[in-house]
Image: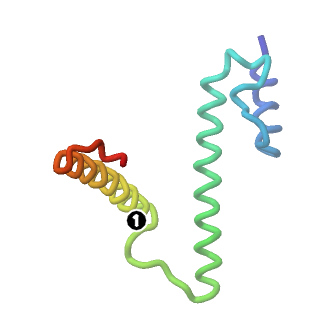
Amino acid sequence: MKTREELQNLKRQWGDDPCWDLEETEGFEEYRDELMSFVKNHRVTRRKEEMAENERAANAFGVYRNSVDLDQFGGMLNALLSRLDEMEEELRRLRARNCGCTGDE
């Protein structure tokens, strides 16, 4: 069984170069859930840093964010895409019912 110190060293090494599936690291199977959580948190933090950097860069060129928050916009976009998928499926069902075909033709 690996020690907590070894686990922390592994996390640090991965953070310096996240080029492998950390949670699949051999010898650290008993820490898999913790490693998965660490990876998720790392990605969220990194994404927030990237967004902040992009905003700083945009502001440096005089481009400002609209009143709609980017996270809110992303959520709205995902909801719209999901609804579009539902509407396409409903259209396929209606066409199939009207023509007696499967809708895949």
**Is residue 46 positioned above or below 38 on the image?**
below
Comparing 79 with 46, the one in front is 79
**Residue 38 x, y percent position in the rendering:** 64, 35
Residue 35 image-quadrant placement = top right
Residue at 38% x, 76% y is 67
Q: Which residue does the numbered mark 1 point to in the structure image?
A: 73
Q: Tell me the element at label 1.
A: helix
**Residue 93 x, y percent position in the rendering:** 23, 46
Kindly give the residue lying farthest to the top in the view shown.
1
**Residue 75 x, y percent position in the rendering:** 39, 57
* Side (left or right) of 74 relative to 50: left
Residue at 81% x, 45% y is 16
Kindly give the residue lying farthest to the left in the view shown.
98
Comparing 79 with 94, the one in front is 94
Give the residue type at disc 1: Phe
**Is residue 78 positioned above or below 96 on the image?**
below
Residue at 36% x, 48% y is 105
**Residue 79 x, y percent position in the rendering:** 34, 55
Residue at 80% x, 31% y is 10
Comparing 23 with 8, the one in front is 23
**Is residue 28 positioned above or below 79 on the image?**
above
* Side (left or right) of 62 relative to 71: right
* Side (left or right) of 5 relative to 65: right
* Side (left or right) of 25 relative to 87: right
